[in-house]
Structures are given as C-alpha cells and as structure tokens.
Amino acid sequence: MKDHMLYRKDIDGLRAIAVIPVLLFHAGFPFILGGYLGVDIFFVISGYLITNILMTDMSLNRFQFFEFYSRRANRLLPALFLVLTVTSFLAFITLPDENFLKYIYSQLSVLAFISNMFFVIVGDYFSPVTEQYYLLHTWSLSVEEQFYFFYPILLGYLVCAKYPVRILVGFLLLSLVLMTVLVFNGFSNVAFYSLPSRAWELAIGALVSVYHFNGRKKYSSALSLVSFATIVFCMFSPVEKENITIGWANVLVCFAAAGIIAYTGRDTITYKILSSRPLVFVGLISYPLYLWHQPLLAMSDYKLLPEWTKLVVLVLSFILAFLTWKFIEFPWRNINFSGRIKIYLLISIWFVIGLGSSVLIIGAKYNGFDRFNYEIDLASVQSSPLRNKCHAASSRLDIVGNECEYNLGKVSWAVFGDSHGVELAYSLAKRIEVVGQALKHYTFSGCPPALDFNTSVSGCSEWIRNSLISIVNNSEIEYVLLAFRHTSFLYGDQLQYGTLTPNHVPTIYNKSWDVLDEKEARDLYWDSFGMIVSALRKSGKKVVLLGPVPELSGDIMQLATPLTIFHQDGLRDLLHVTTVDNFDKRNMEVVRRLKYLIDEEQVLYLDARDAICGDDYCGAVIERKALYFDDDHLSLTGADVILDKFFSKYNGLL
C-alpha cells in the first residue's frame, strides 16, 4: 500500500495561502474581502491529512483511539493554552466587566471545544461587534476538534464498507444540502459555524486522500494552476462585507484547494510556487499565527487604535507565532516524556485554566473588579427592563400578536418601529402613566418599514403589515410614534462604514424578490414608509416621526473605558463624540425625506439632534449620565432627554 505520510512542502505552502488572507481580512484590508475563505482551505487540508493518518494506521493495524487523540492534543493544545493565558491577561486589563465576562464565557467554550456553538448565539461572524471578540477565530478550531472526535469511528466504518467512496460522497452531498437549506431559511449563522454544515469541506479533503491522486493524473499541471487561480479569484472578488455569507465562494475555494492537493506534482508550476521557502515557513507557523492574530487585532479594534497599528499587530503576530513554534510547539513534540505524561500535563493545564475562568466569572458577575476609573455613572448605561419581554425579532416571533401593553387605562399611544423604539416606549409609558394613559409596544429588531417591499430580515414584512392593521383598527390609539433607524438601513452601519454617508446599497427587494439598484431601493423604501404614515393619518391617528439619533464611534462602555487599567481617561471625550457637521452630512437625505412627510402629512417630529447636540458637537453623556447603552441605541436617560425636549415643544399633547 502507498505511504500516506510523505511530507509535502506544497501543503505547507497551501497553509500559508490560507492563513495570510485570513489575517489581512481581519485586519480590514479592503482589497481581500474573500480572505475569510482561508479557513475553508484549512478544513480541506485537515480532511486530507487526518484521513491519511488514520488510513495509514488502520492499514497497519496500529490504530488506537488514545494514540490518535493524544497526537491531536499534543499538536493543538500547547500553543492554544499559551495564547489563552496571554489573552486572558490582555482581556483583564482592557475590557470592562460585561465584555470581560463575555470573554471568559467564550474561553470556557473554547476549553469545552464548543466555541463554534457559542458564536452561533453571539451573532454574525462578519458584524463589527462580533469581530471584536478576542477568541472569535476559535470557532474553526472547535469544528476541527469535533470532527476529530467523530471521524475515526466513521472512517473505520468506511474502511470496512463495500462502497466507501460512494458513502463518503453521500455524506459530502448531505452536508452541502444542509448548508444550503440553512442559508436559504435564514440560519446563515448556524450554517457558518456548525460542524454538520461544514463537514462537506472536510469530506472533500478526505475524498482526495481516498482516491490517491497526488499529482499523477493527466493535465495535472494545468488543473493545479487553474485551482490556484480560482482561490486567488475568490479571495479578491469584490463583495460588500455585510452581504458575505457561506455559499458559492466557499464551494469554489474548497474544490480548488482539493484540486491543488490532488494535482500538484513536483513538476508543476503550482508546486514551485507553494514550495517556495517563504510560503513553507509561513505554513509551518500557520497554526500559532492563526491563534495570535485575532486577539491582538480585536484588542486594537476595540480600543479604537489608529489604523496603522494593525500593521504593527500583524508583524507582532508573525513574531509571536515564530517564537511559539520555536519554543513551545517544536520542543513539546520532541520532549522526552511518554505520551501519557504529556496528556496528563495538558489535562492539568486545561483544568487550571478552566478553574481560573470560573473564578473570574464569579468575580466579574457578582462583585466586579473595580479595575477602571469611569467618568460616567455606570448605572445609567441602561436599556429598557422590558426589552427582552416586549421586543420581537426573527428568532422571537412568539411576541408577534402578543404585543406588550404598558400601564392601565386607555391605550392612547403606540410605538411602532425597530429596536430603537424600545427605550422610547418604556420612557413614554412612564410619562403618560401619570395622566392615566396606556401604550402599546410594536417593535421588531432590525426591521425596516417593509410594507411594500421584501427584506432579508425573516418575518419582518409580514410583521409590519400585521402591526399596521392592528394599530389602524384600534380606535383607542390616538398617537403613533414611528421609530426606525433609517440612515443605517439605507446608508450602512456607522461602525462598519464610518460616520459619513457611504456608497451602500440597501438590501431591499420588490414583491417579486428582484434585487434593486441603489436608487430603486431607496425610493421604494421611502414610498413604503410614506404608505405607513398615510394609512395612519387616514385612520385618524396623530403621527410622530423619530428623527436620526446621533451615532457613536463605538459602544458607550468602550468609549468610556480607559485604554488599560493603568490609564485614567476614557478612550473618547464623551461630551464631544461626533461633530454636528458629520451628523448633518450623514443624515441630510433622511432628514429631508422626513421633513417632506411632516409637511405633506401634517405629522410631528421628534428631533433627537436638537435634544442631544449643541452648536458644534453631539455628546454621549449629560451630567455624568449615559445617553446610550451601546453605540446607537438610546439609554433610558437618553430617551427621557429627547422626550423632555419634545413635550416642552408640544406641551399640549399630555
């Protein structure tokens, strides 16, 4: 039988081709928005190599579960434990309590080999907030670890099966279909992070191993070169970051990686490229390089450091990766201890890190560590206590049709919109309670006014229509506050695109689900919003339109927290977080459209700018109280401030 264990320089070179784009993608380089696909290449390589190892051991009747898992542990855990230890220290000195608590939970999920499931709950891999998790990248490590747990059993069955290749292809197709079904049903997060929907990538690598290609086929040079070109094409394909999801590009890259592994013989051009010394070197340190880069980049991003520091971070990542490979990985593999002693040592370290994490959770959750000097009242960084109970989302459709009603008495007010209406609803309800009035709460997370168009937010369009009918048919309701974050939906989130209006195309579809261009999408949006206002006015309701709320350059706690526990001042001056000029430029078109509706439909305007901003700057605090609880949602204090201004202007409403 052929030796499956021959060392191939080109595979180390392929590892380099996988890891470098990942680093550049996470560093925010705009020319390589397909860099995240490097992880898919790693999965194909893993499927190929692990199948080689297992088939060699099984063919020689020397396979043992303990030996296999011991080798995997010795390969992965020493560097991982070092990075976790250093990252925990960095998190302790840089993150406020709530974020530090999330970090520790994520670390425990890493130790339990389920961090991919943890990040399914956290949210979209590509969102600016999720990217600031120091251990986000470990999701792929958990996928591989889960694969190692199940695969030897599966491969043992395949070796004994009559048609192993057919069965393997069947598993591959089943996983690929599962991924497709999840994506098309709005579960892209599950498709992205979970092993069942990623198993097809590992199976592709396994299939290459089972078929014994190794560059001996006709046209191998051309096929390997085309495969290499396909990877480069997918990495550099232009795509809006917020529209990235698992899909066709992942499929292309995985089959291209398999093509390189299968058809790259020593006489091919691709082999000469991939076996070059620089790429082989990067491939050798690719694992620690992958481990180090994310915590350092995420910390740089979270602390709002200048963009040039990301280049420093990348250089530092290479240095730390080399040192880890040289003084941790390599010595650990060659240390003169038995396999069992090594495993006992790793288990001991695992236990110590886990116990330390548990102690830190108790400290952060119940007592806090009082590590930072804050210039704001932390208790004021508060969202509505009824947010979880009353706020609907694609994952919380049970609330639809069972909307919250605040106070006893006549339901004279309704708040209708996205998540930016939640705190306003709570604050407004407190205000009208004193005059014996009640309020009905209609909000849906991330849902635009999609009365006459379709959106990618599952359940949104139907909810808009049903909520509008409910409000129109409720004769008690006199006033309706419409609270939508128009600017972000139409022009992009400020954390991802900056505070000035970018060239962003909103994800709006017509009733036939046709994709619209920029102008068509925005015109349809405003037509739909106008239809909502018109329907409310025709039913006799008085309508209040929420104007754009000034946005922050980061989460309020992020801005208020000093650089480290050794610094005194917060990252930003909270009295001057954005200029009025920037606010006006970003929201100019939205304000123009809203004021047109004010004149056309005779509705009222809730002017957040007037309440929060001065002549030159907009602040995030007032008398040490936070006006926000994150980067764009008003806190209860912020809601009170703009409602105070509104009712002082329209003092006859109550």
Image (cartoon, rainbow, N blue to C red):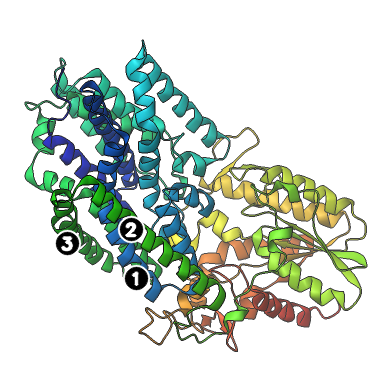
Residue 107: image location, x then y, percent: 42, 59
The dot on residue 319 is 3
Q: Which residue is mark 1?
A: 90
Residue situated furthest top in the rendering = 162
Taking 145 as reference, is 611 above or below it? below
Q: Amino acid at mark 2?
A: Ser
Q: Is residue 389 visible?
A: yes
Taking 12 as reference, is 530 above or below it? below
For marks 1 and 2 on the same chain, the one whose residue lies earlier in the sequence: 1
Q: Amino acid at mark 1?
A: Leu
For marks 3 and 1 on the same chain, the one whose residue lies earlier in the sequence: 1
Residue 651: image location, x then y, percent: 82, 81
Separation of marks 3 and 1 at Cα, in angstroms = 18 Å
Q: Which residue is mark 2?
A: 348
Q: In the figure, is residue 186 to the left or right of 373?
A: right
The crowding category of the residue bearing disc 2, from other C-alpha atoms within 10 Å (few below 14, some 14 to 19, many at least 20), is few
Under circle 2, the secondary element is: helix
